[in-house]
Amino acid sequence: MCGILAYFSNNNITNLHTFIDKLKLLYHRGQDNVGVSYLYEGKLKSISSTNFEELYEKTKNIKSKSILGHTKYTTSGKKNNSVNQPVLSSNKFGDYCLVFNGNIPIDKYVSSNVYSNDTTMIIDFLNIYSEKYKSWKELLEYFLEHFSRAYNIIIQTNDSLYILKDRFGVRPLTFTFLRNSNTFTFSSESCVFEKNDYITEIDAGSLHGLNKYGLKELINFQNLFENHCLFEYIYFLKNDSLFQDTKIQTYRKNIGELMAKRDKQYFDKLKLQFSNDEFIVCGVPNTGNNYAFSYAENIGIPFENYILKNSEVSRTFILSNDEERNKYANKKYLFDRNIKNKNIILIDDSVVRGITLKNLVRNLKEFGVQNIYIVVASPPINNTCIYGIDIPTQEELIINKIEEKDLHNYFGCEKIKYLDLDLLFEALPDYHNKCTMCLNPDPNLEW
């Protein structure tokens, strides 16, 4: 998945610290490593680090008019053999740096034991096949034809940027243009841009070139259909981001409203057993709150922000193993004392392995919460993902271990209810253009 960011200006040389400030807004997309590359005195340089503090130190007082940034989330290969980005390499056309997000399944293109990660496969392809073509345009057109999905790639040369997106448009990629400074910024998410910036989404199957003469679309493959990652809407994208003309905030608000209308009769009956001040809606921070605000408003039960995210713990879903997930899941949330003796409707964005949610329910009960009713803002995640979300095996998914009717016993809650597919489709009118591989229990069917 990862986060990628690019800056290119003919008029403005910017401080790398200013650029890194924006890159930090993509940290939720990858926490394994961070890096930048930049053009300095006519040469490309690349720096990576395990944390932003060190990256700031390494880039002190450096300015550039061409910069790439990357936050890494390892999905292809293990962490100890993955490649930190931006990658600095060279081919027939000269030196270049590359950032990439998504995941290209290696075994679809070469023998699986040839490469330990897809980034190395991409670099080798660009270096070897450059000998057969006359320009970056021709080489990257062949790349788009050869590799179907899933990727956004930005290539930085001494005088240009090349921006390409796979033909299925699996992951978001946006840009802004500031005319007064002749400056372009590209990002995995539009949340890095200012509120009043005009945001443009990169088309699926397109290749753009950017140099001193401006931005030009060089290739645009017309696809019969696209497959935008559904999990981006459900979980990964920040609430103030945009994907395929859908505001994520609007999508999550609609989902909350639809679930509340579905559940209202059930909870109206249940509330008769309790006094009004004993029943509240809480969201699992941070994404769960995006759904919970709307849910509470439409079901007529007050929302209370009594579950707080521990700022010292980042996203546990993208940690590398269950041992790490369990370790941090117990530290992930802090509770307001007013939650004691309450009955709560707990809104979560999704349930994948169930580790964080199980720890959270246990901790809430130990803290003094009476009853917990879980509402999940996605259908059950029951299949793997090979295009950039770290769900490597069906066996580790909680819905494949325990039948849905028994999940409340496993989590220690009173009830758990997933989002119905028809409500999902109602919230996304173009649902036929979404990748739903992770919701499909048949491993022989991708979409």
Image (cartoon, rainbow, N blue to C red):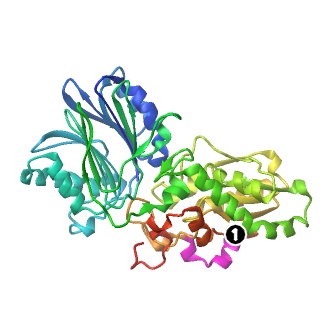
166 left or right of 113? Answer: right
- Residue 58, placed above or below residue 130: above
In the image, residue 51 sits, relative to residue 133, either above or below, namely above
x then y, percent, for residue 53:
44, 31
Quarter of the figure with residue 348? bottom right
Q: Is residue 140 left or right of residue 402?
A: left
Tag 1, which secondary structure? strand
Residue name at image x 21 percent, y 62 percent: 146
Judge whether 57 appears above or below 342 on screen.
above
Which image quarter: residue 15?
Answer: top left
Residue 70 image position (x, y, % from top left): 37, 42
Give the labeled residue for mark 1: 416
* Percent of width and height locating residue 27: 47, 43
Q: Is residue 408 magenta?
A: yes
Q: Residue at x 64, y 54 (%)?
A: 253
Residue 79 located left or right of residue 427: left
Please indicate, yes or no, whether residue 161 appears anywhere in the rendered image.
yes
> For the magenta stretch, what is the residue range?
398-410
Asked whether residue 348 is in view, the answer is no
Residue type beneath disc 1: Ile
Q: Nearer the viewer, residue 211 or 39?
A: 211
Between residues 340 and 169, which one lies in front from this camera angle? 169
In the image, is residue 203 part of the stretch drawn in magenta?
no
Q: Nearer the viewer, residue 289 or 173?
A: 173
Residue at image coords 26%, 69% = 108
**Place of residue 39 in the rendered image (x, y in percent of width and height, measured from the top left):** 25, 29
Q: Residues within 10 Å of mark 1 (few under 14, many from 20)?
A: many
* Main SS, magenta residues: helix
